[in-house]
C-alpha cells in the first residue's frame, strides 16, 4: 500500500478559500490535488505550515491555481519554500502573508480577457 504524500483541508471564510496543505506537493501529487482544488472556488489563502516538501511542479501548480482562482496568498511559508520562490523569481506571483497582515490580492482578469501564460523561472 502506497503512503499518502499529500492531503489538504478546505475552509471557506469571508469570500476566500482557506486551503491547508500537508505533506509533499510535488510532481507525484500535483495532478490529484489540482483536480480537487479545481472543484472549489474563491480567492485562495494557502496555509503551508505543514508542507514538508515542494518542487517546481508544486510551485507551478500554485501559480496556475492562483490564476484560475482570481488570486492566491501563501501563509506560514517555511524558509525552504520561501527560498525556492525567491530563486525562481516568483515573489510577485506567489505573495506571502507576513505577521498576520493581508497582502493585497491581484485584480481578477475578466472573462473576456485572454488568459496569460505562466511566468518562466528567472
Image (spheres, helix red, strand yellow):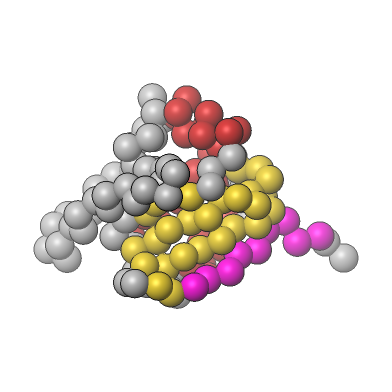
Q: Is residue 30 left or right of residue 43?
A: right
Q: Is residue 36 left or right of residue 120?
A: right
In magenta stretch: residue 8: yes
Is the residue 19 above or below the residue 25 in the image? Answer: below
* Rendered location of residue 72, percent (x, y): 37, 54
- In this rendering, does residue 61 appear at all? no
Q: Residue at x 60, y 65 (%)?
A: 8
Q: Residue at x 56, y 37 (%)?
A: 81
Q: Is residue 28 left or right of residue 19?
A: right
Residue interval drawn in magenta: 3-11
What kind of secondary structure does the magenta stretch mostly adopt? strand
* Rendered location of residue 93, percent (x, y): 34, 41
Q: Nearer the viewer, residue 72 or 34?
A: 72
Task: Count every numbered label the image shows and give the total.
Answer: 0
Is the residue 16 above or below the residue 118 in the image? Answer: below
- In this rendering, does residue 42 appear at all? yes
* Rendered location of residue 53, percent (x, y): 66, 43
Extreme left residue here? 112
Amino acid at each position: 500500500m502506497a503512503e499518502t504524500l499529500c492531503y489538504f483541508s478546505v475552509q471557506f471564510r469571508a469570500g476566500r478559500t482557506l486551503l491547508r496543505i500537508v505533506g509533499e506537493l510535488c510532481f507525484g501529487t500535483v495532478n490529484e490535488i489540482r483536480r480537487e482544488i479545481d472543484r472549489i472556488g474563491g480567492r485562495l489563502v494557502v496555509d503551508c505550515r505543514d508542507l514538508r516538501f515542494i518542487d517546481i511542479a508544486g510551485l507551478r501548480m500554485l501559480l496556475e491555481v492562483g490564476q484560475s482562482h482570481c488570486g492566491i496568498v501563501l501563509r506560514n511559508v517555511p524558509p525552504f519554500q520561501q527560498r525556492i520562490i525567491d530563486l525562481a523569481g516568483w515573489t510577485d506571483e506567489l505573495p506571502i502573508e507576513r505577521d498576520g497582515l493581508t497582502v493585497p490580492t491581484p485584480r481578477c482578469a475578466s472573462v473576456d480577457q485572454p488568459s496569460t501564460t505562466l511566468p518562466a523561472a528567472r
